[in-house]
Amino acid sequence: METKLYTPPQNKTCELVFWFCYPAINSFALSSLGYLWLLKEIEMLPDVCVEKVTTDTQTTRFMPAEVDLMAFSFSFDLDFLKILEMLDKYGVPLRASERNENHPLVFAGGPVVSANPEPYRDFFDFVVIGDGEEVNVQVVNLIKENKSLSRAEILKLLAQVEGVYVPSLPAKVKKSTKKLQQCIYSTILSDEAFFKDTFVIEVERGCANCCRFCLACFLNLPIRFVELEELKRVIDLGLTYTPKIALLGAQISAHPKFHELCKYIYDKAQERPGIEMNFSSLRVDAITPDVIKTLVLTGSHHSTLAVEAGSERLRKVINKNITEEQIFSAVRIAKENGLKGFKFYAMIGLPTETQKDIDALISLAKRLKSTFPGFDISFGVSTFVPKAHTPFQWCGHEDVKSLEKKTNYLKKEFHKLGININISSAKWDYWQAVLSRGDGTFTQFLIDAYKLGGKSGAFKQAAKANKIDTDYYASANWDLETQLPWDFIELTAPPKDFLKKQFCSII
Ligand code: SF4
C-alpha cells in the first residue's frame, strides 16, 4: 500500500503529460528519496499530469502517444539496460536522433549522468547535470510554455538553462547546485519500500572528507547542511505519520549540530517509546556514548563503519585519515553502550595496494574479533572503480583475475576466522569501470549489449563487434594530460588542477 503525504491540486488540466520513469521495480522507486521528492514537485504543478512508471508498471493512465516528456532517474551505471528496455516497451526509439515530433522528449538526471553522461549521450534529448530539484520544475515549465515549438527549437531553449546538457548542441555545462535551506523528505510511505513505512529525511548533501575515490563527495561539493531547526520541524512532521524515521546523507555525523540532533532524537524517544531511528552512515570519529545510546534507544542494534582499507598507509593514500586506535575506540564505545555489532566496509584494488594491505585487512578483522568477543563483526568489500571528477579518475581498475585471486584469498582467511564477508563481483565491477570512464563512441556497443541480454558475455560480444577496447576504459592508467570525456562539465568545486595535485600526492 502507498500513502501519499501530500495533496496534489484537484481538477488539473493536463497541458503537459510527463512520465517520470524509474528503471527498476516499484519497491526500488518507493525507496528513492530524490526520485519521490521530484515526483511530488511535478505533481504539485497545477497543469502538468505526471505518472510514476517503473519496470513492473502494468497499466498507465496515458497512452505512450500522449506523453510529452519522459524522464529517467539514473543512479547506477547498469541502469541503462532497464532504460533501453523501457523505451523499447513503450515504442520510443532508443536514439534521440531517430525520434520525431510525435515522440516524447526523453531526458535523464541522477549521479551517473551528472558525473559522465557521454556513454549514454545519444539516448537522451537532454540531461540534467547536478541537483534536479529546481532544474526539473524549470525544464517542465519551459517545455509546457513552448509546446507549439519544434523539438529542435525547444532543445535550443533548454540548452540555455543552467544544469541542462543537450548532447546535440555541445557546449560547456555548469552543474546545478541546490541550496539546502529546505530539506527533502519522504512524500510517500509504503510497506513495499525497502525501509518499510519509514519517513526518510535528508540531513546534508555531500561530504567534506574528500576520500580520493569518492564520487558522492566530489560530485556534491560544497557540503551543505540542513539547519537544525528545520530538521527538528521535519522530524516532528514525520512522527505524525509513522514512528520510523531514517536520517540520510553521505556523512551525517559531519553535521555541525549532529550531537544536538542526537540529543533531540534521544529526548523524543524517551518521551515516546517505540520511535525507531536509523542513521545512514557514521564516521568512526563521530562515535560517542551519547550517539550510540541514541541508536540503541531507537531500536538500532547494528550499524556500519567504513574503514575502506586495512592498513593505515593505504587509508592515508586514499585520504581516509582514520587511525587503528580510532577504529578500536569506536567499537569499544559501541559495545559498552549496548550496540550488538558493526558491519565494516572496505575496498580492494585501490591504487598502490600490495599484498601487505590485504593481509592488514585480515589482521584488523582478526584483532577486532579477539578484542571484542561477543560483538558481531562482518565485512562488506567492493573493488575500486575509478569515477569521473575524483582524484583517482586517472587510475585503472585492477585486472579481474588478480582481483579474483584476492577475493578468494580473503574469503578463505575470513572463513578461518569465522567472520562473514561479502565481496562484490570483480567481473561486474570491471564493466562498471568501463561505463564510468566511457565516451560518446559507446552508443551501438551499449545497444548491442542490451539486445544480447545484458549479461557479462553480452557486453564482451558487443564490445568486440563494435571494436571497443574496454581495457583502455576500465583498466588503463590514464595520462594526466588525457582529454577526459567529462571535461566539458563544470562542477561547483574543485578545479581539475586540485584533482591532479591530489592524484600526484600518492605517486
Ligand atoms: S567519508 Fe565517505 S562519503 Fe565522505 S568522502 Fe569518504 S567515502 Fe565519501
Image (cartoon, rainbow, N blue to C red):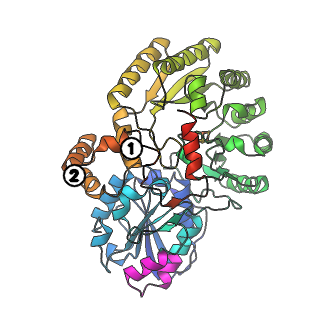
Cα separation between marks 2 and 1: 18 Å
Q: Residue at x 58, y 72 (%)?
A: 44
Q: Is residue 24 above or below residue 426?
A: below
Of the two numbered discs 2 and 1 on the same chain, state the one appearing first in sequence: 1
Tell me if mark 1 has few (under 14), some (14-19) or many (20+) residues whose alpha carbon lies within 10 angstroms of its own: many
Give the magenta range: 140-158
Mark 2 or mark 1, whichever is nearer to me? 2
Using residue 165 as the reference point, say whether residue 85 is left or right of it.
left
Q: Residue at x 26, y 45 (%)?
A: 459
Judging from the image, what secondary structure is the residue with disc 2 in? loop
Q: Which mark is residue 362?
A: none
Q: Quadrant of residue 369?
A: top right
**Residue 362, percent from left and from top:** 51, 17
Compare residues 153 and 393 and report the one nearer the observer.
393
Confirm whether the magenta stretch covers residue 141: yes
- The residue wearing badge 2 is 466
Tell me if mark 2 has few (under 14), some (14-19) or many (20+) residues whose alpha carbon lies within 10 angstroms of its own: some
Q: What's the magenta bit mostly, secondary-structure-wise?
A: helix
- The residue wearing badge 1 is 432
Q: Which residue occupies the extreme bottom position in the image?
A: 148
Compare residues 234 and 204 and report the one nearer the observer.
204
Amino acid type of the residue that numbered disc 2 sits on in the rendered structure? Asn
**Would residue 84 be visible to someone looking at this image?**
yes
Using residue 445 as the reference point, say whether residue 158 is left or right of it.
right
**Residue 431, percent from left and from top:** 34, 42
Compare residues 31 and 397 and report the one nearer the observer.
397
Confirm whether the magenta stretch covers residue 176: no
Q: Residue at x 54, y 18 (%)?
A: 360
